[in-house]
Image: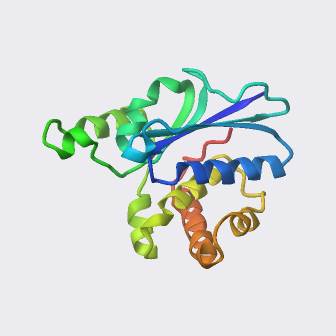
Amino acid sequence: MTKNVLLVGVGGQGTILVSKLLTTGLVKAGYDVKMSEIHGMSQRGGSVSTHVRYGEYVYSPVIEEGEADLLISFEKMEAIRWLKFLNPEGHLIVNNYKIEPLPVLIGKGIYPEKEIDEELKRLSATVINAFDKANEIGNMKVMNVILLGTVVKMMNLEYIDWEEIIRSNVKEKFIDVNINAFNEGIKLIEKREGDVYAL
């Protein structure tokens, strides 16, 4: 049976790196994996999505609407924007972080934070404060790897050697901080009673 993981965010948040790390781990675990990147207006802070599909045999890299078993959003508004792709039985993980789009920045729009928060609560989403944890670590660029740790824990994939995967895919001077961020992401889920979602 094929499982579908959709990662979404805003250009520059590192969603594609996390998708590549996740894909590498799933391949090492023996799954057939297909990954598809959709960059959109990523250079201008637009939406970025990555589709990761894995199982015994995977024939298409694209997740259709209503098929995502797990939707991971690196930014709050993107969670709502991509919600139609989530399987009714699927689960939503959201980084409690907002990036104001251009219309908001130039005063021609309002970021609907209250409405977004209410919708996430209604959906029983798992909300992760990766920003706060990255700030605690001292490097805001590792928010994405914190989220990778939460995803790995939620999917019960800790048996894969993620430390080696991180070592092989990030620059040497950033290895230790990224491994630390990954482990902190796992801890964020371990503290949540009954919140683990196994695919």
Residue 32 in the image: x percent, y percent? 82, 37
Q: Is residue 55 left or right of residue 197?
A: right
- Which coloring applies here? rainbow
Which quadrant is home to the N terminus? top right
State the image coordinates of residue 118 (x, y, percent, origin top left).
29, 36
Residue at 28% in and 42% down: 101
Q: Is residue 185 left or right of residue 96?
A: right
In the rendered image, is residue 126 in sight? Answer: no
- Residue 116, x across and y down, in percent: 30, 37
Number of residue marks: 0
The picture places residue 183, in percent across and down from the top left corner, at: 60, 67
Q: Residue at x 42, y 37 (%)?
A: 79
Picture residue at 40% right of the left edge, 38% below the top: 78
Quadrant that contains the C terminus? top right
Q: Quadrant of residue 164?
A: bottom right
Horizontal placement of 117 versus 128: left or right?
left
Q: Residue furthest top?
A: 65
- Front residue of 182 and 171: 171
Name the residue nearer the viewer: 137 or 166.
166
* Residue 174, placed above or below residue 6: below
The reply to whether residue 44 is visible in this rendering is yes
In the picture shown, does residue 76 fall above or below 182? above
Most distant residue in the left direction? 107
Please tell me which residue is depicted at 65% across the width and 52% down the height of the picture. 152
- Pick whichever, 53 or 196, lies toward us: 53
